[in-house]
Amino acid sequence: MKSVTNWTATFVEVPDPFVGKNARLVGMCVNGNYYEPNWLYENEDFLARSLVETFDLHRENSEWWVVDRETIKECRSNWKNQDIMWQLLELNGEENIDGSITCKGTAEYDIEFMETISPSGDGTKWGPSDFYEEVEQAIKAALAKGPSHTWATGWLACKKEICSTKLECANGSIIAQVSVSDDFDTEGLGISVIPYTQNWDAILKAINEAADKASRDKKENSPVRLYAVGKYCHKTKSRKNWQFTYLVPCGINADFYDQPPGDYYHRWGWQEVDEEADNQDHPFFDPHPEELPTDVAEKLARGMNQGKKSIRCKGWIADTQDEREDEL
């Protein structure tokens, strides 16, 4: 059975400091029904994936862009003269009164019965691939029905980590998806697709690959760089404890936040200070934890605000696990 889906996607032009022009997805209509951009994240089905591929969309937190961060990094000089909105017009697009561009298209695909073998809820224990026994057996039972049997799990939450896993079997492929988040409500999504198999180790490998992609995606999306500050151990040449925390805004979206996102932190800079302390007049090093000498706190904070990965001063060290470039 064939399904024909008519869709439109609307983009607005957004100035970008690197590429000159960029385009952000602001909404779409599928068969006459309007959806917010986050629909693409919540519905990783055939249509959602085809829309992402059509426009080469890339997610930045909950927003979707035509140009991604990596492209900007690698092609800053090459992209400056390209008119993103003109390219969208070439994709069967029409210009609206407000200057936005709406592109139209049709997707045709086979409708297959998709069995939900495990509803959304707790499904893994210590990580995205550490399934509870009953969930693992349900997945294996679905796999035993062969590659022509279409099925999917719900989003299976992990008990110990902020992540969830979804497995899908369709069109002769196994699709593993992992969604992750953190204390700053930064999201990351990873997808790994392999040919149909009943090899459980191969499926777990695909899930872990999706988890790695999700972790990288989350790090790229994060507007926060977190530093751990503690005493330096000369024998191991590393930090031997974690006494203080320092938060620095970073990334493309950093300017949107007056304070760190999420529910756990409410100020930039040093966290172990009086809640009534005002950090606005002294953004680099004051106020600071009383246990830190002022000159040490000043040097560490300046290095952290410069985006350095590791800063040492008089027996103290501040370091971060952030894998982005040493610049904010």
Image (cartoon, rainbow, N blue to C red):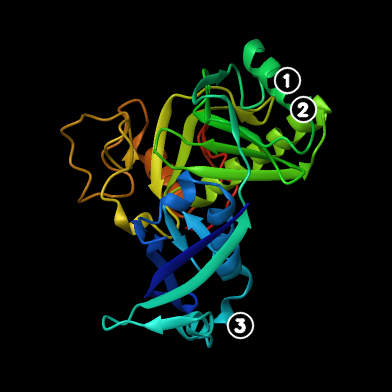
Visible in this render: residue 67?
Answer: no
The first of marks 1 and 3 along the sequence is 3
The residue nearer to you, when weighing 150 against 126, is 150
**Residue 129 in picture, x, y percent from top left:** 66, 25
Could you tell me if the residues under marks 1 and 3 are in contact, i.e. CB atoms within 8 Å? no
Amino acid tagged 2:
Lys
Badge 2 local density, few (<14 within 10 Å), some, or many (20+)?
A: few
- Residue at horizontal 61%, vertical 23%? 127
Q: Secondary structure at mark 3?
A: helix
Q: Is residue 174 above or below residue 164?
A: below
Question: Real-space Cα distance between discs 1 and 3?
Answer: 51 Å
Residue 179 found in image quarter: top right
Visible in this render: residue 182?
Answer: yes
Question: Real-space Cα distance between discs 1 and 2?
Answer: 7 Å
Amino acid tagged 1:
Ala
Q: Secondary structure at mark 1?
A: helix
Which of label 1 and label 2 is nearer to you?
Answer: 2
The residue nearer to you, when weighing 285 against 169, is 169
Residue 245 left/right relative to 195: left
Which numbered tag is attached to residue 181?
Answer: none
- Mark 2 highlights which residue? 145
**Residue 156 in picture, x, y percent from top left:** 54, 26
Badge 1 local density, few (<14 within 10 Å), some, or many (20+)?
A: few
Which of label 1 and label 3 is nearer to you?
Answer: 1
- Mark 3 highlights which residue? 78
Which numbered tag is attached to residue 141?
Answer: 1
Q: Is residue 283 above or below residue 155?
A: below
Q: Secondary structure at mark 2?
A: loop
Could you tell me if the residues under marks 1 and 2 are in contact, i.e. CB atoms within 8 Å? yes
- Residue at horizontal 47%, vertical 32%? 229
**Residue 292 in picture, x, y percent from top left:** 37, 30
Q: Residue furthest front?
A: 1
